[in-house]
Amino acid sequence: MRVVDAMQKADWPAIIGRAAGVALLLAGVLLAAGLCAATPQDSSVTSIFDSHSTPADSIRHLSFFVLGVTGLIFLVVFSLLSYVVVKFRSRAADTEREPAQVYGSTQIELAWTVIPILIVVVLFLATARVIHAIQDAPKPAEAVEVTAIGHQFWWEFLYPGLGIVTANELHVPVSDPSRPTPTFLRLLSADTDHSFWIPQLAGKTDLIPNRVNETWLDPHETGLFLGQCAQYCGTQHAKMLLRVYVDSPEEFKAWVSAQQHPANQDAKEAAGRRVFERTACLNCHAINGTNGTGRFGPDLTHLMSRRTIASGAAENNSQNLRLWIQNPDSIKPGSLMPAMKLSDAELDALVGYLESLQ
């Protein structure tokens, strides 16, 4: 009996320890949910709970609904489990007899069959409604159309109706609720699977070789919104970043006008232009007005209008541009851009020419 008594006394610390562990887990879940729901103060932190576009709003509302349903399920199960652990814990008086044996309960079996089915049906219908609203949204005549092509490891953006080709930094107009101006994107892949994702503006949409997928943005306010490739696509997947600039109508019109201008032909940079045209640069890159028509790398016609290079991996300045040309692996290890191995004079001339491409 002394052994049995000792075991019974040891049960309470074990019960308290398990309860504390579960309570700590619950507190962690609630803390994580609170952090997710909080509005980020740093614009570099992206969150689906800080939505600024119609599709993202729909996803956020659905996420809160699903979290509410699953949170309620967790609380009910946790409460029942806690009650059972305490109510039916082992006692010294019960060691000599066997607990009552229950072999079946029609009511309980119906409950744990019907209730989960109803929960799944409700979640399915809510999700299907949001998917339909996003995927089958009508395209107004004022919509901006963009073709986004995923490459290893950068983004190409083409504006067919505007005659613009750019890379890694997408410019779209803000959409006034009284006169919506959404941006519809056709998503293509040039090599392997990618995934287009700007958490604050829209959900993830895959880019698959030999298949056309679509998504759309309907931003409510101007600003910079960060995104990334959300599908592992190779060595530099983590640095396949993208930036979306939501401009006012006037700013977007000015950007379009600047992008439609031909490349700078300043005679002072003729030496750098010759370096571009006489090396392997033109095999991958295009610059309007030169014999460079490559499509394996980004179009450089207005390179210096972009704030970053290497798909957002580095700030677009003279020092980084020089380093990127001289040794790409120092900025983006495993990228497909080769080191050009130019002389100092050639590198100076080429960097000077590229910096003139506003």
Image (cartoon, rainbow, N blue to C red):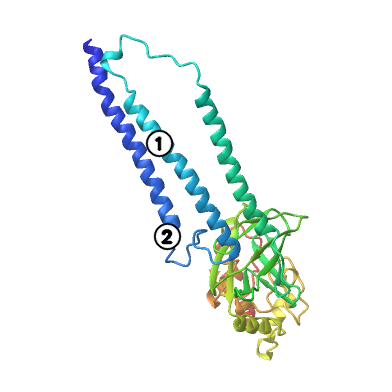
Q: Residue at image x 65%, y 59%?
A: 134
Q: Nearer the viewer, mark 2 or mark 1?
A: 1
- Mark 1 neighbour class, 10 Å CA radius: few under 14, some 14 to 19, many 20 or more: some
Dot 2: element: loop
Residue hosting label 1? 78
Q: Are marks 2 and 1 in contact (CB under 8 Å)?
A: no
> Could you tell me which quadrant the C terminus lies in?
bottom right
Is 289 in front, or is 324?
289
Amino acid at circle 1: Phe
Q: Residue at image x 66%, y 60%?
A: 336
Picture quadrant of residue 181 = bottom right
Is 195 in front, or is 263?
195
Amino acid at circle 2: Ala
**Residue 96, x across and y down, in percent:** 31, 9
**Residue 23, x across and y down, in percent:** 34, 40
Q: Residue at image x 47%, y 62%?
A: 45
Picture quadrant of residue 229 = bottom right
Q: In this rendering, would 65 be left or right of 354? A: left
Residue hosting label 2? 38
* Mark with earlier residue (2, 1): 2
Q: In this rendering, would 151 be left or right of 11? A: right
